[in-house]
Amino acid sequence: MESAPRSMRLQIAVAGRTNSGKSSFLNLIAGQDVAITSPVPGTTTDVVEKPMELRPLGPVLFLDTAGVDDETALGGRRVERSERAFNRADVLLLVTGAGVWGVPEENMLAAARDRKVSLIPVVNKIDEQPPAPEFLAMLKEKCGFEPLCVSSTGGAAERERVLPLLKDALLAACPEDFIQTPPLLGDLVRPGDTVVMIVPVDVQAPKGRLILPQVQAIRDALDHDCLALVVKETEFRKALEQLRTPPALVVCDSQVVDLMVRETPAEVACTTFSVLFARLKGDMPLLAAGAAAINRLRPDDRVLIAEACTHHSSEDDIGRVKIPRWLAKKIGGEPAVTVAAGRDYPADLADFKLVVHCGSCMLNRRETLRRMELARRAGVPVTNYGMAISECHGMLERVLSPFREALDAYRREK
């Protein structure tokens, strides 16, 4: 449970007004003091994350957020952080008191509808004020879920009563695209097939390990009873020569896409880890069409490079150095590049001509799709690192060839 990546967990945001008992509710569910509780408004200053195992849901991540009506000195920044958490939440839990419904709750309901996620009402502090049947009926009508009534100070007995009810509600609210996520590579191969994965080991490779997309691709190949052959780019040709039958699929790091395409026989399917993640985490046809838009860029056009993780950039950083350099070569001049790291994703994208997003290995599918939707609403093409790199090298059609819908979207846009 502890080793499950946050990006692969069901993420559940606990939201509501200040002092509605959000942190107390989370502590009750966890059976431990996860979050600090206090009658002082604004106690929760940042999003508190609590990973848990909730069978039969599996690994989940609760996000304890600041009050949506926080009017303290730092209230605006706290609410902004909470709204960022809503962007990655697969389910929202709205904690309120008996008879409490107003503008903050209506705003939360609107936020859930805008993000196309379920909102489960939680009526807290029922030991202080039991909710009226009319209020519970109103909540059910507005939210579409039976309200969960709880006393967060009720201790172990209350936890035993509430936990099964919460699990049932979460199972009903769990989005279909979380339960049935797009495949990584399993639908491209058959049991017994060989998958060759080209993994460069350079200054950007983490010492002693592989990056998450490579690990997940290897695991997916094994889960589908394939033979996974992992090689450096310098050993790729030798690997092909030593195989008695051609591989069913070749996957490479985007930075060596030109080598892979050059060395891979035309009849062998090939793609990149980043293209695989475009389907797993986002809207693949949208990203493919966004890559085609690179051909319309002009020097000095504004381009957003969006990094989901926070890291110290190297002198040859993929997002901050290499991609801008490849774009400049492609369009015949320097674009005006802005970098957004971690969760610092701009709310207003209208001034950009293109968004180039990372592979989202550190984000869940919900947050990635939300970012793409914001770009679509702003009328700004969006693509990801790997597709942009392949397009700049003239290789995108080849690596999209296993994915007919995305390839068609790319061709239409180009």
Image: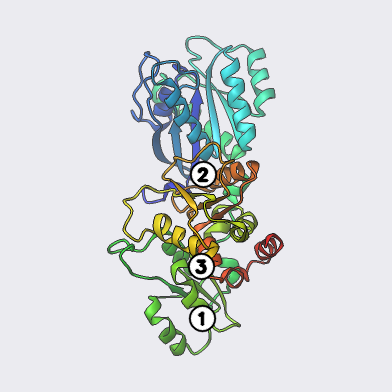
Residue identified by numbered label 1? 262
- Residue 320 screen position, x and y as percent: 40, 54
Residue identified by numbered label 3? 272
- Give the residue drawn at x 39%, y 19%: 42
- Give the residue drawn at x 44%, y 41%: 343
Instruction: Indicate whether 292 appears above or below 155.
Output: below
Give the structural element (helix, strand or loop) at label 3.
strand
Label 3 Cα crowd, 10 Å radius (few <14 / some 14-19 / many 20+): many
- Give the residue drawn at x 64%, y 32%: 113
Tell me which corner region of the image, top left, top right, bottom left or bottom right, holds residue 375: top right
Q: Which label number is shown at residue 57?
A: 2
- Residue 278 screen position, x and y as percent: 55, 57
Label 1 Cα crowd, 10 Å radius (few <14 / some 14-19 / many 20+): few
Q: Position of 124 compared to 414: left or right?
A: left
Instruction: Indicate whether 135 appears above or below 147.
Output: above
Q: Position of 76 compared to 403: left or right?
A: left
Along the polypeptide, which appears first: circle 3 or circle 2? Answer: 2
Query: In whole angstroms, how far apart are the C-alphas of marks 1 and 2?
Result: 44 Å
Give the structural element (helix, strand or loop) at label 2.
loop
Along the polypeptide, which appears first: circle 3 or circle 1? Answer: 1
What's the image's color scheme?
A: rainbow
